[in-house]
Structure formats: C-alpha cells, structure tokens
Image: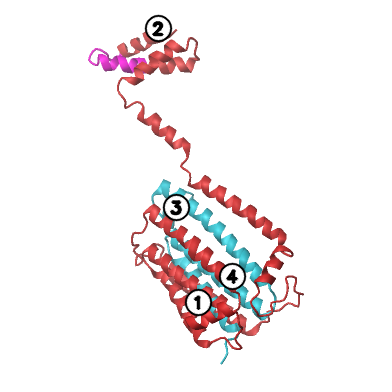
Chain colours: A red, B cyan
Amino acid sequence: MTAVLLNLVVQGTRPALPDVGVFAVAAAIILAGAIGVVVARNPVHSALMLVMTLFGVAVMFVIQQANFLAAVQVIVYAGAIVVLFLFVIMFLGVDREEDIAKEPLRGQRVLAVGLVALGTTGLLLLGQVSKWTTGQPHVAGTDTGAPNVNLLGKSLYTTYLFPFEATSALLIIAVVGAVVLARRPPATTADEEADAAPTDPGTPADATTTDEAGTPAGTDTDTDTDTDTDTDTDTDTGPAATGGPSEAATEATGAEVDA
Amino acid sequence: MSINASWYLALSVVLFSIGALGVLIRRNVLIMFMCVELMLNAANLAFVTFARTLHDIGGQVLVFFVLVVAAAEVVVGLGIVVAIFRRRASANADDLHLMKG
C-alpha cells in the first residue's frame, strides 16, 4: 500500500482504476479510528484514534488526486489540532478514565443510536435515488482529475479571494478570542488579595491609622468603615471589658474621634 | 471492480454518523469536540469526492476553508473548555447546569 501511495504522491500519475485494496484498508482505518474515538474511555486514547482517522482521510484524499489537501490535512489536523487537543487534555488533567457504563439520562443512548441509525439509512437511501448535480456552471475551474495544486491556488486567489481574506480575519479573531478566554481574569486575583488581607495580624489597624492620618476629609461611608475597624481592634485588645452597650459606646467614641 | 464515487460517499455517511453518535452519547466535552472533528472530516471527504465526480475544483477550495474554520473553532472551543474547567473543575457536560430553569 505504501508503494502505491508513494507512487501516487511522487509521480502524480493517475491510475485508471483506484486500487480496491487501498480503499478497503483506508476505509477500515478510518472506521476503526472513528469508533475508537467514540468508545475510548481515556481522552488521550480518543485523540490518538482521531489521528488514525485523519490519516485515513488523508489517504482518501490522495486516491482522489487531492494531494495538496492531503498534505494540509496531515499538517493542520494531525500536526496542529490534535496536538492542541492533547495539550489541553494534559494541561487540564482530565486524562482520567470515565465510567461509560453509567448512563446519566435514562434512555438517551438508545434514542441516540436509533436516531443516528435512522439518519444514516436515510442518507444512504438518498444517495441511491437522488441526483447530485444541479446544472450550475462551474465558477472555480474544472477538476481534470490530475494533480491540481496550480488550479486550486489560482481559484483560491481569484474566484475565492474575498473568502480567503475573510479567513485571515477569522483566524485573527480566533487567536484574540482564545487569549481572552484562557487568560486568568484579574478580578479574581484582586478578590484573593482582599480575602487574604484581614488574616494578616496587625497590619489592618496600622493601615486604618495611616488612612486616617493621610485622608483629612473623607465621606461618611469612609468614616463608618473606619469606626468599625477601630472597634474591632479595641475588642481585640480588651475582650473581657466590652459588652453590648460598651461596644456601642466605643463605637460612638470612635466616631467622635473620627469627626 | 472499480471504486466509484458512491463508495466514498457511503464511507462519508458512515463516518458522519459515528461522529454524530459520539456527540450524542459522550459526556466529556473534549471527546465531543473530537467527534465534531470526525463529522467535519466526513464532510470534507464528501466534498473531495464531489469535486472529482463533478469535475469542479470548488469542492477542494471549500475543503480548504473547512480546514481553516475547523482550526479556528477548535482554538476557541478549547479556550472555552479551559475557562469552564477553571470554574467548575470538570470536563463533564452534565455538570454545566448553571442555566437550568
């Protein structure tokens, strides 16, 4: 099989009839990989099975004289997308095995299998009976069946120039969006610092005193918070003496001192 | 015995169905993403087959665009998965019931 594939890739000769054996082996690889993606318990195994399927699809592209797309398939999918999947799986540490036997929704799997079987049968029947062509003229160029990187590039830069440019904008947006999504939000770090500050002994009282010294005229809410912290420090220094009414008294004195 | 276009299309249909089944029955968000990739590959295979059968290079151009959009989709999707995992510490789709009424 590899000899046939190398012959196809290197020489670019078009065989009169694609080899049945190549198709059968590649189809078996594709289907085995796809089933493996679905049934594998470990997500890492699923990603490796996905690589298998992608290589099988690349072989299918080569048999159909889409050599450029086969190369892009291997480079982009197997080289970039699956590596990104594996990176995220191992980064998150979700490579634990999942219990597939537990069914979270009752009857959902049976329904899913039934619906998919129905859809598959319908599509296969549709392929038998319907016509595929609509009679529209070709706008992109004629696929002669020979290796056609020239034609593909010419069509991409003339007929499909605007979608090609829009693709670049899409990629930029995807990069920016991924950075924004995956960045740790700064609000949570500020909350963590605010949570960590009162546990530090001694520093809150000092901070409030420096605040009182530094800010001569604050708003009412500021003075209220200052009095609260003052009573807290007072109860810390003399816990036995302060009861309910005396606490109110110290609060009033604190407010007087602040005023 | 030759391989004509309907064989490729049948393989594409089966591959698409396996991907759809995986999206429906699996609960791990990452595996659901991989099954979406399977479905995209099935569509690509059908596009290339039609490009050869109908002698129109537009099918192959469309496969090129599908590849680009799939790459962008995976990048944004995995960014969302990382952001969700940071809050919920779970990659299970059943744990994301914050908007359940």
Cα gap from disc 4 to disc 1, whole angstroms: 30 Å
Q: Do pointers 2 and 3 mark residues of a single chain? A: no
Location of residue B24 in the rendering, given as x and y in whole percent from the top left corner: 47, 66
Which mark, residue A69?
4
Q: Magenta segment, principal secondary structure?
A: helix
For this orientation, the residue located farthest to the front is A11
| Residue at x 65%, y 67% (from the top left corner) | B62
In the image, A98 versus B65, the foreground residue is: B65
Residue picked out by circle 2: A257
Q: Evaluate whether label 2 is on the same chain as label 1.
A: yes
Which of B8 and A80 lies nearest the eye of the viewer?
A80
Badge 3 density bin: few <14, some 14–19, many ≥20, Cα 10 Å: few
Please state the horizontal and vertical placement of residue A176, each as a whole percent of the image: 56, 47
Q: Amino acid at mark 1?
A: Ala
* Distance of label 3 from label 1 (alpha carbons): 28 Å
- Magenta segment, which residues? A229-244
